[in-house]
Amino acid sequence: MSEPSNELKPRRSSLGRDVAVLVLAGIALGLSFNALQAFAHSPRALSWIRHEPKLASFESLAGELPPAAAESVTSAPVEATPEPVATSATPTPANPAKPIPVPPPATTPSSKPAAKPTVPAATPAQPQIVTEESVAAPVPVVLPVVPETREPLEVGLDFTKRFHAGRGAAFVDARSAEEYAEGHIPGAVSLPFDDVYKKPELAKAFDEKGLPIIVYCGGGDCDLARTLAYALIEAGHKRVLVFKDGLPGWAAAGHAVTKGVQP
Amino acid sequence: MNAWKAAGTFAQFALGVLFLAASLSKLGDLNDFANQVNHYRLAPVAWVNLIAMVTPWVELLTGLSLVLRVKPRAGAFVALVMMIVFTIAVAAAWARGLDFRCGCFGKAGAQSIGAKKFIENVALTLLAAGAFTRRED
């Protein structure tokens, strides 16, 4: 058997081999360079598998809840009042918290039992107020200032509850519309991340009415809230918080959960 | 050497210089480049760092191949494929209205995604196609 001569080899195979050598050499160099940097414990080394960076905590920026303000949340009246109530407590100098006006309760779900259900026939669940807490009017609370950031901030249950009680934030549910219908934080707007991923203009069009945005999802390993928060920031929103405990954390703390599709 | 070949040689050299510049600017801060790749949200997050690790090195070898004229057609082919992928990425980000720096030239060229970036990429893709048509002697 004789070897085929070089002249008979198609030109393309030589090009393919050269391209493969070039690309593989580049990959090998890149991986080796990073391995060397990792070995030298260089801060410039990248982790081999990327994880989303841990979000900064809003609590660490805002400080602890002042005791008087915490009291005003827990002892807040449940009855609805006809107009928005201005915040009443005075912030301590050490805390960046300051009173901010509370918007009218126009964006919250209807509280009247006689309200017409807006559920399509295909959806078995009817809008249903699970507890009366969800219809409470804004109560006097001290709302901390949310700074404008280029990264979302993570917020815990206490501050989330306070923003909710004082209507000081626009709540956004990042889960699917079906999950939203099964139960959501009262007053939250459904903005499924999957929809925003397909149509980012939805994130741009979202009107937070001048309030900070608090995004949540299913808690635990749920990543939708964080990814939606990034999408909202990329769309130009500047004050975006992620409620890390999500709906399970909210419900486990005994707070109201509303059922029904988005009005 | 006829004019067509001279134009091809020039295209290869210009593309090589661009790829070298793009590569070196990314290698200066791979963490930043990894963040930019992540912003495109086209690849799974777990893969983003691996992409950021190897892309500048492939660009570097491609640029060297074109500038030093070592297997320049292979370099031009890789450059063409990369430019097509980059152009699709920019177009997808632009179409989805994402607003971030393209990461094309590391921190040095902090251009935002948009029509200008897309047209630039299309032009460079055509340059790469021109470079690839130049046969080796």
Image (cartoon, rainbow, N blue to C red):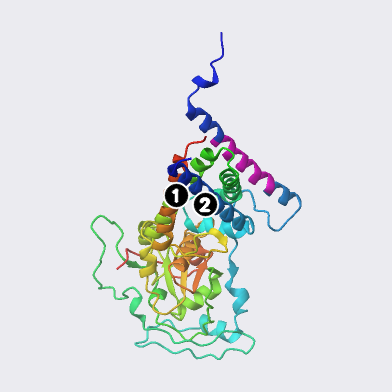
Q: Is residue A140 above or below residue A237?
A: below
**Foreground pick, A221 / B73:** B73
Q: Is residue A37 above or below residue A110?
A: above
Asked which secondary structure carries label 2, the reply is helix
Q: What residue is shown at x 35% (from left), y 57% (from top)?
A: A178
Q: What residue is shown at x 63% (from left), y 74% (from top)?
A: A60
Mark carried by residue B127: 1
Q: Could you tell whether A262 is left or right of A87 in the image?
A: left
Q: Which residues are magenta?
A: A19-33
Q: The numbered mark 1 sits on a residue in which chain?
A: B
Where is mark 2, residue-wise?
B14
- Dominant SS type (magenta): helix
Task: Characterize the local packing of mark 2: few (<14), some (14-19) or many (20 or more) Cα atoms within 10 angstroms.
Answer: some
Q: What residue is shown at x 63% (from left), y 90% (from top)?
A: A93
User: Is residue A22 found inside the magenta-colored segment of the image?
Assistant: yes
- Is the residue under label 2 in contact with that under label 1 (CB below 8 Å)? yes
Res A51 visible: no
> Looking at this rendering, what residue extends furthest in the top direction?
A1
**Foreground pick, B6 / A57:** B6
The amino acid marked with disc number 1 is Leu
